[in-house]
Image: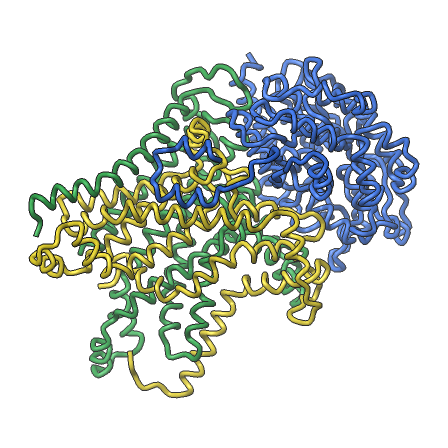
């Protein structure tokens, strides 16, 4: 603070005196600024972090934001070398790209107690670029199908272990009772490449489509995409919860947990919340099946990891690394298990979690989640060959722009303001334009 | 408008006015009520108005998650700092335009206002880069400066229209008595302009307090005011209406209370030269 | 009254304000203008080659551009009409001899003190939400299916939220203005046998014209840049149904990180805003001539 004050000596004395009075801060141990998403697991991390603060004497300043806002702020900061944050929360899309851009500190040198080999190789690979690990996984997820066993039983329905989207629609039709505030299916619809495009991206894979052909020509106007979008629009409009075009993961999770959805296809990481009787009123009546497939079983469940990372612009690199090693360690997972109940432990990152009988006993979904995550194959996401990696995203920098645009258009289709074919035509044009501008299409 | 009114008319307009007043303020009242409910009661159907178990737990949960007073203090410094700074710069300018108008005074005034038409998003990246280069990201100084510049045109305009109403003869009388420019401003003008300055100050504190573009985009943790505090509640973790309500009330209460106490001041000066 | 001495002093006193505002306008705008000619994407570090008007070309070609200009006008227009008409009616009502006037007035002006993010969050979740919102409950009470405001009437919803915030401001200015209404004139007109309605049209409305121009000018300045309300509620959607120019620039430069395209959009927005300002200020400048 003091340094900042002296730098701007051009300010008037008035402002200075006002500010100096306010800025008399502490000068002891380091204070880190950490930016993270307002997902349940991160809120737990915040609640438990005083333990680390007490142990090390450092202090954390939390910036907790909704996913899209977080992404915008963190990206702006890191790309301009702003240095506002010491620790950032990024995903499997950003970590390798930003690592390659030389924006992130490599995290290969934690001491041996960290046990890198305990991390699932899929997850580790997803956060690695050029042989360096650029972010350490906080939790990892695939997607699968939640459903209400009680409602299925009452209606005489059986959920197969590997349902198709067509079957899901049939079930949703039978269980959709809006007058009782019970909706056939809850799906994300909020625009954003991490929101509706996560669900829709896997739907496209299941319907046999892909983002680009081997020459990077976009295929958004293909019949597979049209089938997928027509299906998505149809199921949401007929059997979806009202408000779907504005609902993201958190909104759906709240609705499912309060018993308003019969089926919900979303992140496996939500299982810890749904099966936690303290948070959810459907903990004992929820079942799960794998993510729906349709004509293809490839890429029907997504792969994502939320990970912590240190920007190169951080002035407190070492302390930040120390926090990362703590927050993504086996020790931390055990701490959550003991303090918050094992069902709430951050899933999907470490083998030791799935070897822990406490966790397996508390989390009936554990084995299925493990299988889903390990079977996700980002290099091979579609029935057709692709030039890219990533299941529900395409690991190139241009994707953020394209995915954002397509996500916006798709939400218009869900709301009924544009038809699926109009949406895909506009999206294809945009994708082609962007790919041409960036030189993929010659 | 002192006219004879019947009691019946009085009762009727009173009823109408109160209906309108309660309707308009209902969202705030409803938020206040919800902040004292449990999360389950907050989404109860039918909605509960007063018959619920009142609790202040939500306020504690919110405080535990994000240090309210840190953000509150940032808001105070930024809102008041930027307004005072703007006043210091604006008073001489408004004085000179009001009492020594030139051919271009009106053009200058309108040009000043037009700088406010610049959409903030369009210049975010440049400003971000400038702040970075001066080491001012996530600092109150940057926000005080930017909000001062944002509000300066309005401040000048308000003061100008107010000062213009002050008859020039009084100043001339003062000058005859041998007052120099400094004394003229300090002892004659300022006292007469106090109501105008006060309401200018109030309006701009309100505008700065509520400004939610720069305050969100240029802060991280250190300088984040209440606008940033509320954004972390923008999507739910489970049921969250009660917590959202508590956080909302905490964010708006200070300025709401200030506004209530000073509404008379505000009304007196909010003329923008419109009263004639 | 202006001596040479005071003229010079006046200039000196005006200078800081003018210089500051000039810098505030020229520096960021110059940088934006410069960026708008580059191929500059935050996600792709490295060279930022000069591309001339390419960014403008793509920005104008984008179908969202036309929609966003229209949406901007609808938003500004919708809120202005609502607040001016509503504000006059409110002011007239609050000038009546009512019991507990002070408290009623406080309740009416309260929404003006609520920060945009808070009011957008409250409206979105507690009123417009089609599952848990109050409007959904009321609809069900009367046997209607709940209406999804943000998906099916996004612009209308945003207008409601913004108008709610600005209505008190308009009412405040009109109240101030009404208080200076000449009561002799009113009484004279009463004696002449003018009806209440005639009085309103021929005396009150003309008296309020100046106040109206002030309300329109100030609100337009703020309404052209509506952002937080959109970000929190509809996110500009569905599709681009509630995207205004400001939000479009935001999407380009901060969601897609195409700073070049965003800068081009920013320049276009500045130009359009200045066209609006030009007409507005001409009309209003006349009205404010003292």
* B117 with respect to A26 (left or right): left
Q: Who's blue, chain-wise? A: A
Quadrant of the image occupied by residue A392: top right
What tint does the image give chain C? Answer: green
Q: Is residue A81 above or below residue C84?
A: above
Q: Is residue A313 above or below residue B51?
A: above
Q: Residue at x 38, y 52 (%)?
A: B204
Q: Who's yellow, chain-wise? A: B
The answer to whether residue B6 is seen in the rendering is yes
Q: Residue at x 45, y 47 (%)?
A: B77
| In front of the other: A54 or B234 | A54
The answer to whether residue A97 is seen in the rendering is no
Query: Horizontal and vertical percent for residue A123?
Result: 77, 25
| In front of the other: A19 or A182 | A19
Quadrant of the image occupied by residue A235: top right
Query: Horizontal and vertical percent for residue C260?
Result: 45, 25
Query: Horizontal and vertical percent for residue A60?
Result: 63, 38
């Amino acid at each position: 603070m003091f340094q900042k004050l002296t730098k701007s000596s051009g300010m008037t004395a008035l402002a200075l005196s006002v500010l100096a009075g306010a800025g008399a801060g502490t000068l002891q141990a380091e204070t880190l600024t950490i930016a993270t998403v307002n997902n349940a697991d991160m809120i737990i991390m915040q609640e438990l972090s005083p333990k680390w603060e007490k142990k090390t004497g450092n202090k954390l300043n939390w910036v907790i934001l909704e996913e899209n806002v977080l992404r915008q702020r963190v990206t702006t900061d890191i790309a301009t070398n702003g240095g506002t944050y010491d620790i950032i929360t990024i995903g499997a899309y950003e970590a390798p790209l930003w690592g390659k851009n030389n924006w992130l500190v490599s995290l290969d040198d934690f001491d041996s107690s960290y046990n890198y080999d305990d991390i699932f190789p899929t997850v580790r690979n997803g956060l690695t670029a050029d042989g360096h690990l650029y972010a350490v996984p906080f939790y990892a997820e695939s997607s699968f199908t939640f459903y209400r066993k009680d409602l299925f039983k009452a209606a005489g329905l059986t959920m197969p272990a590997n349902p198709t989207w067509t079957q899901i629609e049939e079930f949703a039709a039978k269980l959709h009772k809006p007058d009782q505030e019970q909706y056939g299916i809850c799906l994300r619809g909020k625009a954003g490449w991490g929101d509706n495009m996560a669900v829709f991206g896997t739907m496209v894979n299941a319907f046999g489509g892909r983002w680009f052909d081997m020459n990077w020509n976009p295929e958004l106007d293909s019949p597979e995409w049209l089938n997928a979008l027509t299906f998505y629009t149809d199921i949401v409009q007929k059997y979806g919860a009202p408000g779907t075009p504005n609902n993201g993961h958190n909104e759906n999770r709240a609705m499912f947990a309060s018993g308003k959805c019969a089926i919900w296809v979303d992140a496996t990481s939500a299982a810890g919340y749904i099966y936690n009787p303290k948070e959810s009123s459907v903990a004992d009546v929820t079942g799960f099946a794998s993510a729906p497939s349709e004509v293809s079983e490839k890429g029907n469940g997504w792969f994502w990891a939320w990970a912590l990372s240190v920007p190169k612009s951080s002035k407190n690199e070492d302390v930040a690394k120390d926090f990362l090693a703590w927050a993504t360690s086996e020790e931390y997972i055990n701490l959550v298990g003991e303090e918050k109940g094992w069902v709430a432990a951050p899933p999907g990152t470490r083998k030791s979690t799935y070897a822990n009988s406490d966790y397996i006993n508390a989390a009936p979904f554990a084995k299925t989640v493990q299988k889903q995550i390990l079977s996700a194959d980002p290099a091979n996401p579609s029935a057709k060959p692709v030039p890219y990696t990533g299941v529900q995203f395409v690991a190139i920098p241009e994707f953020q722009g394209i995915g954002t645009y397509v996500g916006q258009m798709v939400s218009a289709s869900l709301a009924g303001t544009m038809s699926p074919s109009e949406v895909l035509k506009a999206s294809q044009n945009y994708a082609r334009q962007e790919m041409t501008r960036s030189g993929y299409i010659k | 408008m002192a006219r004879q009114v019947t009691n019946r008319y009085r009762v009727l307009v009173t009823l109408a006015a109160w209906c309108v007043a309660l309707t308009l303020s209902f969202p705030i009242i409803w938020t206040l009520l919800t902040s004292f409910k449990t999360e389950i009661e907050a989404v109860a159907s039918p909605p509960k108005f007063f018959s619920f178990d009142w609790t202040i737990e939500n306020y504690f949960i919110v405080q535990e998650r994000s240090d309210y007073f840190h953000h509150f203090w940032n808001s105070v410094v930024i809102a008041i700092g930027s307004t005072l700074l703007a006043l210091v710069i604006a008073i001489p300018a408004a004085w000179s335009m009001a009492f020594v108008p030139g051919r271009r005074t009106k053009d200058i005034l309108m040009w000043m206002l037009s700088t406010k038409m610049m959409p903030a998003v369009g210049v975010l990246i440049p400003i971000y880069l400038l702040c970075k280069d001066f080491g001012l990201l996530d600092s109150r100084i940057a926000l005080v400066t930017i909000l001062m510049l944002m509000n300066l045109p309005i401040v000048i305009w308000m003061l100008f229209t107010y000062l213009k109403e002050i008859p020039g003869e009084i100043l001339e009388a003062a000058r005859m008595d041998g007052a120099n420019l400094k004394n003229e401003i300090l002892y004659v003008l300022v006292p007469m302009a106090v109501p105008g300055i006060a309401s200018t100050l109030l309006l701009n504190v309100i505008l700065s307090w509520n400004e939610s573009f720069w305050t969100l985009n240029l802060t991280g943790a250190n300088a984040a005011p209440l606008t940033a505090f509320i954004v972390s509640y923008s999507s739910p973790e489970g049921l969250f209406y009660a917590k959202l309500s508590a956080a909302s009330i905490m964010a708006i209460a200070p300025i709401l209370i200030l506004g209530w106490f000073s509404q008379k001041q505000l009304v007196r000066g909010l003329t923008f030269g419109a009263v004639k | 009254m202006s001596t040479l001495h005071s003229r010079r002093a006046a200039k000196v006193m005006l200078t800081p304000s003018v210089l500051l505002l000039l810098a505030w306008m020229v520096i960021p705008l110059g940088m934006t203008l410069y960026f708008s000619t580059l191929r500059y994407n935050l996600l792709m570090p490295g060279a930022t080659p000069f591309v001339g008007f390419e960014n403008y070309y793509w920005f104008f070609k984008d179908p969202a551009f036309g929609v966003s200009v229209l949406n901007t006008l609808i938003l500004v227009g919708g809120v202005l009409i609502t607040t001016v008409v509503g504000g006059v009616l409110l002011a007239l009502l609050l000038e009546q001899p009512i019991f507990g006037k002070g408290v009623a007035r406080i309740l009416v002006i309260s929404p003006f003190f609520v920060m945009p993010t808070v009011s957008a969050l409250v409206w979105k979740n507690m009123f417009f939400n089609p599952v848990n919102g109050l409007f959904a409950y009321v609809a069900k009470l009367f046997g209607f299916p709940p209406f999804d405001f943000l998906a099916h009437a996004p612009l209308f919803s945003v207008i409601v939220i913004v108008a709610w915030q600005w209505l008190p401001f308009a009412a405040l200015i009109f109240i101030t203005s009404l208080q200076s209404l000449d009561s002799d004139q009113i009484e004279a007109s009463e004696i002449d046998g003018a009806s209440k309605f005639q009085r309103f049209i021929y005396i009150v409305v003309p008296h309020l014209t100046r106040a109206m121009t002030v309300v329109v000018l100030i609100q337009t300045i703020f309404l052209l840049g509506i952002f937080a309300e959109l970000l929190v509620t509809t996110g500009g959607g569905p599709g681009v149904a509630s995207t205004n120019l400001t939000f479009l620039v935001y999407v380009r430069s901060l969601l897609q990180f195409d700073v070049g395209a965003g800068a081009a959009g920013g320049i276009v927005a500045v130009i359009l805003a200045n066209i609006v300002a030009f007409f507005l200020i001409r009309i209003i400048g006349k009205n404010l001539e003292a």
